[in-house]
Image (cartoon, helix red, strand yellow):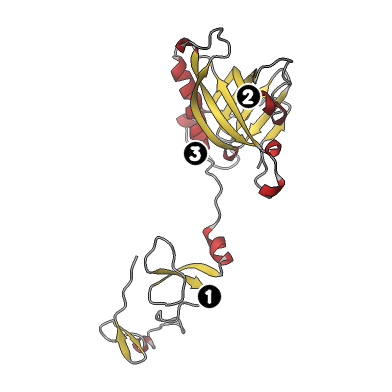
Amino acid sequence: MPPTTIRTAPADDTFTSLAEHQAQTPSTFYNAKPVLHYKKNGIRAIASVDQISKLPILAPAESGDAATTVQTLDVWISSENLTLFNPTLSTGLSIPYPSISLHAIQRLPDPSATDTSSAEALIQGLYMQLDLSDPNTFSSSNDTSEDDDPTVELTLLTTPSSSETPAQAIQAMFDAVSNCSNLHPDPTFDDDEEMQDAGGDSRIVFEGSVGYEGISGLPGVQQGSGDGGLPPPFPGSGGWITAENVGEYFDEEGNWIKDGHKIMFRFTL
């Protein structure tokens, strides 16, 4: 699901506070309110001027030669998504966590400082790479240009409260994004679908078959055939082994019998 543009700021009663969530056992895990890990108004956001058109939460840049724009946003970091809202524009962006391809604490010059060359002018911000594309829409790399790149970069700057240092303030926002992102792992291809596409199935069978494809990282383990059968040398691949016919496959010592000859069968994992 791609990021969604919203026109109304989230209401406080649409969330469960983190403190309340941690203090009680939820009566149900379904249809519960998102847990609010972090909220703060008046956070500065820094973005490149050439990316303003991709972010509806940013107002058009004023005339000038500045390469970046600094605008004020309100931020909600919940277990469901990251919401950035520009109260001046009455426009926000609800961002699913899989759309945050990268986030990190960045050290950068304070945009409000008059002398950005001094060490004192360096501050910390939450740097994010956002993928604004729809994961359900396929596009060929040959059909896209640099202007169509759905990735944007955004840095958030927060002001510490009276009880915290600047480092603690940015760490709190970083931790909130990290913890909520962990609740939404990146989508991956299903192993069963990959094996079916390759003409096999997801069952694991063992060594002893020449001509069957092995499974990487599992020595001696091979992929089943697409028709649902086992590799021919495996016991029982020609039919079920039952109490009545087990003597046709194994002797009294447990050795597999193949064409009247005993074969020592070894499982390797």
Instruction: Tell me how far mark 1 sits from mark 2, CA to CA.
Output: 55 Å
The crowding category of the residue bearing disc 3, from other C-alpha atoms within 10 Å (few below 14, some 14 to 19, many at least 20), is few
Q: Is mark 1 on a helix, strand or loop?
A: loop
Where does label 1 land, which residue? Answer: 228
Mark sitting on residue 182? 3
Q: Which of marks 1 and 2 is in front?
A: 2
For the C terminus, which image quadrant?
Answer: bottom left
Mark 3 or 2: in front is 2
Could you say which quadrant of the image residue 55 lies in? top right
Q: Which of marks 1 and 3 is nearer the N terminus?
A: 3
Does 37 appear above or below 231? above
| Residue 191 position in % (x across, y down) | 52, 59
Residue placed most toward the observer, 166 or 153:
153
Residue 267 lies in quadrant: bottom left
SS category of the residue bearing label 3: loop
Residue under the image location 49 percent in, 24 percent down: 106
- Dot 2 corresponds to which residue? 47
Relative to residue 131, is residue 63 drawn left or right?
right
Q: Where is residue 54 in the image (x, y as percent from the top left)?
A: 70, 31
